[in-house]
Amino acid sequence: QVQLVESGGGVVHPGGSLRLSCAASRVIFRYFGMHWVRQAPAKGLEWVAFISDDGSINYYADSVKGRFLVSRDDSENTLYLQLNNVGPDDTAVYFCARRYCGAASCHLDHWGPGTLVTVS
Amino acid sequence: DIQMTQSPSSLSVSVGDRVTITCQASQDIKTYLNWYQQKPGKAPKVLIHDASTLAPGVPSRFSGSGSGTDFTFTISSLQPEDIATYYCQQYDKFPPFAFGQGTKLDIK
């Protein structure tokens, strides 16, 4: 069973920085692209960032572009999200999720339980 | 950017009801549309991918249909454990990998 566990959340001041981690177990991490998705309190899901299986392709939501950085360490089976210059709108639970691609398209087949970031 | 418009935003339902949720894309996304279920305090879970393919272990009362810009998600006979919020997500033209706004089901 694939397990993803996020960590690194907490309270951060406006303008501050934080690094989130997503540890993967029981999975060949290096073969999968990974996403970060966040959910503000009582709000819907918002896609944040993607990194390809080899780390060569990154995508970001406009709301975080230039402030957040996604990276991965395949030797440690760990995904990261560096949050810089945070603001109140970045307060959310941050989920990491694995991308699974079939013959036609892709979907997010495994998710971590999330880590809460509070900007205050 | 592609916008995903999901409706309704909330629905009051009874056990045994047939439930239908729609998702409209602002551009043609072929069948590259996924549906997720999220229960309070939990991570989302994929139910349907590629518009109509049931994910492993998902009960057959869940189904999806559609292509192009218009998609439908159906629960044929609502069970108590289906009370949750449901989201569509497009996976054709990205970024962004946009989600719909969500549909929250509650008991009537």
Image: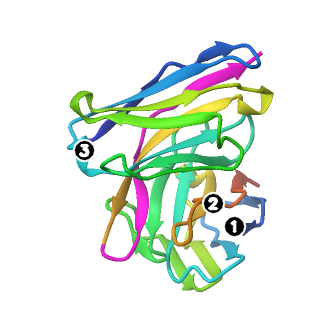
Kindly identify the residue that appears in the image at 64 percent across and 48 percent down.
A45
Can residue B37 be seen in this snapshot?
A: yes
Q: Nearer the viewer, residue B19 or A48?
A: A48
Q: Residue B1, which numbered label?
A: 1
The answer for how far apart the CA atoms under marks 1 and 2 are is 9 Å
Determine crowd level at label 1: few under 14, some 14-19, many 20+ residues with C-alpha closer than 10 A: few
Q: Nearer the viewer, mark 3 or mark 2?
A: 3
Where's the N terminus of chain B, which quadrant? bottom right
The answer for how far apart the CA atoms under marks 3 and 2 are is 25 Å
Dot 2 lies on which element?
loop
Kindly identify the residue that appears in the image at 68 percent across and 75 percent down.
B25
> What is the basis of the colouring in this image?
rainbow
Judging by the rendered image, the residue that carries numbered circle 2 is B98
Please provide the residue range marked out in magenta: A103-120
Kindly identify the residue that appears in the image at 67 percent across and 31 percent down.
A92
Question: Does A7 sit left or right of A26 as displayed?
Answer: right
